[in-house]
Image (spheres, rainbow, N blue to C red):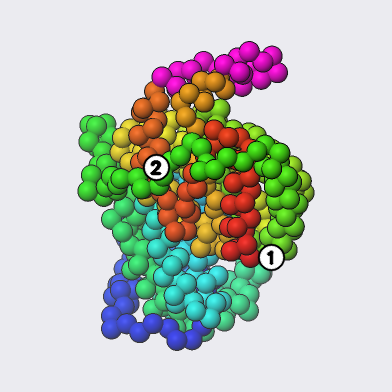
Amino acid sequence: MPYEHVNNTPSREQQMLDKLDLTKTADEKEYAETLSSLQERLGVLQRALRDLNIPTLIVIEGWNASGITMSVHEIIQALDPRGYSLHAIERPTREEKDHQFLWRFWLRIPPRGRIGIFARSWYSRAITEEMQNPSWQKSLKGRANRINRFERQLADNDTIIFKFFLHISKAQQKQRLEQRERNPLTAWLVTPAIWNVHRHYDDTLPIIEDFIEKTDTDYAPWTLVEATDQKFTILKIYHTLIKTLEKRVALANSGKVKKPKEKDLPKSRKNTIQRRTSPDSAVTREESQQTMMNLQAEMLETQYLLFKRKIPLIILYEGWDAAGKGGNIKRMTQHLNPLGYYVVPVSAPTTNENQFHYLRRFIKRFPTGGDIAIFDRSWYGRVLVERVERFCTEPDWQRAYFEINEMEEDFVTSSGGGIIKFWLEISKDEQLKRFNQRAEDPLKKYKITEDDWRNREKWELYDEAVDDMLARTSTDIAPWTVVESDDKWFSRVKTLQTVLDTAQRLL
């Protein structure tokens, strides 16, 4: 790993990597006789995973010159190139730097039925980037927690995760680096920075071990590989892959795949957030319009300040059909600079989007520093429409509450940004009135669909789902604001004022 040296490395009584027997080698005859058979078995398993629609993620990490490229090369010899994607992780691009840490890795996760191979991964980037910070030890602990959440969410979505760390001694690393330098074709690979890392091998070793320990989980375990002998390295990786995949394929074929334990799911809580449809005191339309115009002018100034300070902001709207989400968004953005915000209209996921973890399509649209992303409906569809219409299983939507909380916390803490969440509440009578108005107005008739009428028949089920959503996902970092929306103009003023108040706190 291209880690840069820092002082004050953690002290450890025992070092797991030092306990590895780096003298292990593979017998030449055994290697020649078994490699072809192992490749055939892995190829068969790849096709089985495709047929079973199971995503697989393989991470190869290790020291510089430990054989990461060689290991990846040997693995893909067994695979159909149409069924895997290879990602060589280097320094992040400017766009990737502007997003939170895990954003670019979410975009690269494998869809169902495919294998994603990472030559270096979030681990290399976490250590390399965080060790530049003065409080790097605390930062690394935070990164480890976020990585564990990320991998657990993928595993809960049926992804099989392999993580290999290729270990060689300091002396072996020096020998390999010198060999590369002597070869004109590979000399360019050995930079002064790599030699600097090598000189601080002994300081870096306990840091790597500590990070491995913090991220070694039952759903995404590490396999430590004695990488002195390349043949031994390849055989160990193949055996590990095949043993785990054969077991998983057998379980899938028998219908006994392990699901998240019920005790791990969040317990139901009573909603204490008041859901009113009308404000306490009536305000005339003229008064609301004048207030709104003043707030819109202030909103433009705030947008420029957020952009200047590179603070990203997410504003999401959920609510009953015909509650006024579109009208709210129109007034929210009416005087904003169009180059500094964008609206994400959310509908049912496409066939391709359904092949990934459900959060991926939303994370993909998260804003960079200084931008405002406005979601017209959002990831909360998982615990609303997908729950009520049974588009996912009960464990899926139960698990989504803490997955969503984790995702929102990661965005805020990683980016320094904010999330504002609106639930637009209207009465059942007001909704019927608006439905009829839309049906009778030729210019608004397109807004009313058969789905709207059908959803109305399930009002009580949606009402219960909304209560659960508010109770389980209103957090200190991303609280819900219920907007009394029987009065459209009051609703528009309240959402504008809430955004301005939140933005001022961020600024």
**Type of amino acid under label 2:** Met
Q: Is residue 457 or residue 451 the one in the foreground?
A: 457
Indicate which disc, 2 or 1, sits on the residue closer to the N terminus.
1
Q: Which residue was labeled with disc 2?
A: 469
Is residue 416 inside the magenta stretch?
no
Q: Is residue 466 left or right of residue 65?
A: left
- Determine contact: label 2, label 1, CB under 8 Å: no
- Magenta span: 436-457
- Where residue 486 sits, quadrant-wise, is top right
Q: Viewed as shown, does residue 416 lie left or right of 18?
A: right
Q: Which of these two is toward me, 354 or 487?
A: 487
What residue is shown at x 52% (from left), y 76% (from top)?
131
Vertical order, 233 against 487 (above or below): below
Which secondary structure lies at badge 1?
Answer: loop
Tell me the tag on residue 309: 1
**Front in this rendered view, residue 181 or 104:** 104
Q: Is residue 87 above or below residue 345?
A: below
Point out residue 231 in the picture as x, y percentages from the top left corner.
39, 60
From what the image shows, is residue 299 above or below residue 183?
above
